[in-house]
Amino acid sequence: MRFLPLIAANLLRKKVRTALTVGSFAVALFLFGILAVVRGAFRQGIDVAGADRLVVVNKVSIIQPLPIAYREQILRIPDVKDVAFAMWFGGVYQDEKNFIPQFAIDLDSQRRVFPEFVIPDDQWKAFAADREGAIAGSDTAKRFGWKVGDRIPIMGTIFPGVWEFNLRGIYTGRRPDDDRTQLWFHYDYLDEKRHWGKGMVGWYTVKIDDPDHAARVARAIDERFANSPYETKTDTEKAFAASFVKQAGNIELLILAIGGVVFFTLLLVTGNTMAIAVRERIGEMAVLKALGFGDRFLVLLVVGEALAISLLGGVVGLAACKLFTLRGDPTHGMLPFFYLPPAAMASGLGLAAAVGAAAGILPAVSAMRLRVVDALRRV
């Protein structure tokens, strides 16, 4: 703490230079925060996937359906606790740009298989009683200004025509990164009105008694329907979500590459700034050494200045990023959520501190090796 007044005084000598260096850190950490949000959105399905859930799809492709009769057969497999099914609808609301994940769901088991989605009991009862009822995620309801009781027209793409739904409920999530963008409606309503694919579903979500039995249950399901007209491919929910992320390319590598370049550039900029600051104060440091201040003091002083710049810039950048995310999703629903978690903010501050310390090491060593006689001779 006794170094802080001296560090502050040194940094305020060159206000413009300090402000620009702090700004560099702020911009870098703002970008880091945005990358963390995008990475989290792409990994959302992986990170929140239930360890006790399996996903069963058609072995040929997920776009190929499965018979609804498979549900009862899956339920008879040992260690299967519950089974839900769903069908992708693929409609648009008002405009083609208004993308919403829409699913025809199984009312009987939806809440049991997906307990992370929270819906008031009275709203769920109203939804169950209305054949044209629908439930929307809180983010989607906020995005379009929907309220319970609204009539929502959806233009079908896979299933042509205008489909109208009565909004009977709005669900939320137990965790900050739960997907709140979906729209659910009755599978029976879809099956009744569509002209093709009757009695078929998109996929099954299977809840099992013990996650340790996942591999055995998955194998048993696929063996049950082997050599049938609709063979299956069963994975854990986490593996299923990861396969979707891979279809978009190696997002993880891209984000790491961008972040690595940004922080390496920041390291060079900050290191150069601190080297200049040390060269400008050679005479002062020689005097400090002559007065009895040791090498350790000079090292802590220089590294402390670099850390102060990096942490101040990091706090500003991450705070700006957090405020930006609080304004809502700028992608208009293309990402399942737009949220900067505290863990990512802590990681960002840690990286900023590491870059600041690394940038201050070489100038600090230079100051430590300074000989009083040589330094005073330059003045």
Image: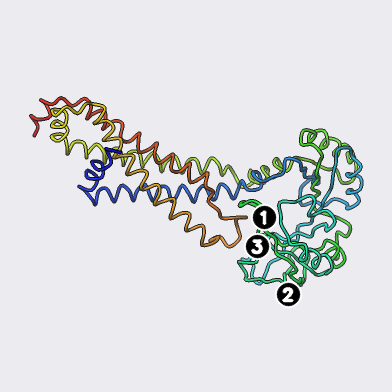
Mark 1 or mark 2, which has the lower sequence index?
2
Which residue type does callout 3 highlight?
Answer: Ser
Can you give x and y, in whole percent of width and height, for residue 112 in the image?
80, 51
Q: Secondary structure at mark 2?
A: strand
Q: Secondary structure at mark 3?
A: helix
Q: Which label is found at residue 288? A: none
Q: Give me the C-alpha separation between circle 1 and circle 3.
A: 9 Å
Query: Image check: 334 left or right of 218?
Result: left
Q: Residue at x 89, y 48 (%)?
A: 70
Q: Mark 1 sits on what residue? A: 173
Along the line of sight, the residue nearer the viewer: 295 or 4: 4
Q: Quadrant of residue 220?
A: top right
Query: Image check: 120 left or right of 295?
Result: right
Q: Label 3 crowding class (10 Å Cα cut-off): few <14, some 14-19, many 20+?
A: many
Can you give x and y, in whole percent of width and height, for residue 358 in the image?
35, 33
Q: Residue at x 67, y 55 (%)?
A: 173
Q: Label 2 crowding class (10 Å Cα cut-off): few <14, some 14-19, many 20+?
A: some
Query: Image check: 232 left or right of 44?
Result: right
Which residue type does callout 1 highlight?
Answer: Gly
Assess whether mark 2 and mark 3 are in contact (beta carbons under 8 angstroms). Answer: no
Q: Give me the C-alpha separation between circle 1 and circle 2.
A: 24 Å
Height in image: 322 above or below 4? below
Assess whether mark 3 and mark 1 are in contact (beta carbons under 8 angstroms). Answer: no
Assess whether mark 2 and mark 1 are in contact (beta carbons under 8 angstroms). Answer: no
Q: Which label is found at residue 151? A: 2
Which residue type does callout 2 highlight?
Answer: Arg
Q: Residue at x 14, y 30 (%)?
A: 286
Along the line of sight, the residue nearer the viewer: 169 or 74: 169
Q: Mark 3 sits on what residue? A: 138
Query: Marks 3 and 2: which is nearer the front?
Result: 3
Mark 1 or mark 3, which has the lower sequence index?
3
**Which quadrant: the N terminus?**
top left
